[in-house]
Image (cartoon, grey):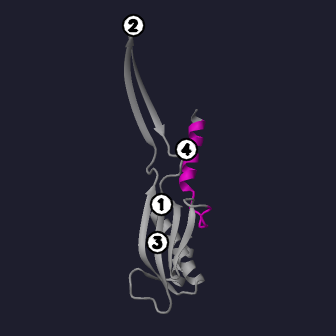
Amino acid sequence: MTRALVVLAALALAACATPAVYAPAARPGAPGYSELKIEADRYRVSYADAPNEAAAADYALLRAAEITLAQGYDWFIVDNRATNREGQTGGPRISIGGGTSSYGGRSSVGVGAGVGFNLGGGAKSSVSLEIRLGRGARPADANAYDARQVQGSVRQRL
């Protein structure tokens, strides 16, 4: 019994520690990045199922930079940003319950305890960016990014 608990705890920790993979999503809603061309110089770029919001944002920015450079542009502006966090967070959950019953002149008391682990890997974050591409000098806008610099700095963190 103790060995089974140790194995379950190890599996739960391994699921939580699984890093996100930077790859295209196999289908809509699947883990990975996706993009949708809205106009010639506008895209919606998304990354789904990252372990945290910072990783999801990095992956979406990296994909935005790759698209920008592949289309022959130098910079992009994030016109709209949406984040989503799903799933259970926190550590193990403990519950305690009790009850009584009586039947035919007899009575009983029961107490129970349970420990639950989230084997689903914890919370997952997704980020969606609507970007506009541009050439030449980057605008003086806090939401404007140099595609080459983003690509270099985010790849270093991967």
Foreground mark, 4 or 2? 2
Secondary element at tag 4: helix
Q: Are marks 3 and 4 in contact (CB under 8 Å)?
A: no
Span of residues in magenta? 3-26
The amino acid type of the residue labelled 1 equals Ser
Question: Which residue in the protein does label 2 denote?
Answer: 104
Secondary element at tag 3: strand
Q: Are marks 4 and 1 in contact (CB under 8 Å)?
A: no
Q: Is residue 100 magenta?
A: no
Secondary element at tag 1: strand
Residue 129, percent from left and from top: 46, 72
Q: Which mark is residue 125?
A: 1
Determine if residue 34 is in view: yes
The amino acid type of the residue labelled 2 equals Gly
**Is residue 154 shown above or below 17?**
below
- Cα–Cα gap, marks 4 and 2: 43 Å
Q: Are marks 4 and 2 in contact (CB under 8 Å)?
A: no
